[in-house]
Image: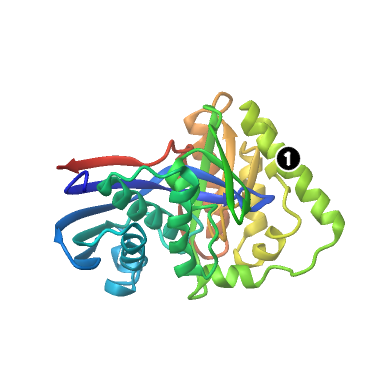
Amino acid sequence: MLMYRLVRVECPASSANLGPGFDVFGLALDVAYDAVEVEVVEEASEPTIAEFRIVGRYADKVPQGENNLVYKLALTIMKELGLNLKVRITLDKNVKPRSGLGSSGASAAAITLALTTLAGINLEPTKIVELAAVGEELVTGSRHADNVAPSLLGGFIIIRRYNPLDLVRLDPPDNLGIVLLVPDVPLPEDKTRYARSVLPQQVPLSNVVHNVGHASYVVLGFALKNVKLIAKGIQDGDSIVEPARAKLIPAYEKIRKAAISSGALAVTISGAGPSMIAIYDREELSDRDAENIGKSMLEAIRQEGYEGEYFITRPSKGPKITKIET
């Protein structure tokens, strides 16, 4: 029996990896949210989508109709949960696609949470993340959860393993400030798959030791709510993935240096890029100081002949259910 007739949920953007935590770390970001509204038309003999609309800032930047991730994942989830319904779905697309901010993860999280809420199904966190991660597989070919997990659960996520999925959520420090640079640069058509294809298949043991040590500091910093420990773990913390992906971002080194010289504690690529994330202590730097970090990062990319935009933000607490009708 259905709990509601209509549900609208919003799920946040996210930043995966945070330096040394490839496919393991994810952080929800209070910078943009994808929203999905699902309305039940009637019961049906099988899961059916009567109408599918895409609105929002980036509506024209994602596949339309049956080719859209949300459309495909909605049918998959309804079949998995035994929801034989005819529904109307609206995707409000506000997380920039192919930006390194977990765009597909936010959409997958939103449709997953909307359908489970609609049906009144209370799933364990790992189960709902597993359902949403199917959407990532549809887009990237890999069922990774470092974006969908923070989009669904909020805060900082550590994924211990994938089979079976085991993860932990931690609340970020209140004074963790974030500056995001989202550059407008040429990208491969299938950006995420390509960004994975450039990664080394074998690495020296010393690089593994380096990453484990820095990743430990990131976790310790979140556990102790210590921004400086988090920064120590992130800054130059990845000697495996980031060096390979840095070549895909114009002015990568200039952006890093500009942010640090303007007061940032650490800078790294957000997910598969090209966005870059800088962190700072909100108790030590003012809003004006944070703006200066953003301006310096933007100026660095402009010196290479590209445009972009920056955002001053902080971690997100997670999804919001913004509309319910019985």
Residue drawn at 17 percent across, 65 percent down: 44
Check disc 1 and give the amino acid type. Answer: Ser
Which of 316/162 is in front? 162
Residue drawn at 37 percent across, 57 percent down: 107
Vertical comparison of 92 with 179: above or below = below
Q: Residue 12's x, y, as percent?
A: 40, 46
Vertical comparison of 303 with 319: above or below = below
Residue drawn at 47 percent across, 43 percent down: 125
Which of 233/131 is in front? 131
Q: Quadrant of the C terminus?
A: top left
- The colour scheme used to paint the residues is rainbow
- Asked if one can make out residue 102 in the rendered structure from this viewpoint, the answer is no
Q: Residue 147's x, y, as percent?
A: 50, 53
Q: Residue 287's x, y, as percent?
A: 47, 31
Label 1 sits on residue: 216
Quadrant assignment, res 245: bottom right
Q: Residue 189's x, y, as percent?
A: 48, 76
Vertical comparison of 285 with 157: above or below = above
Query: Image check: 105 left or right of 214?
Result: left
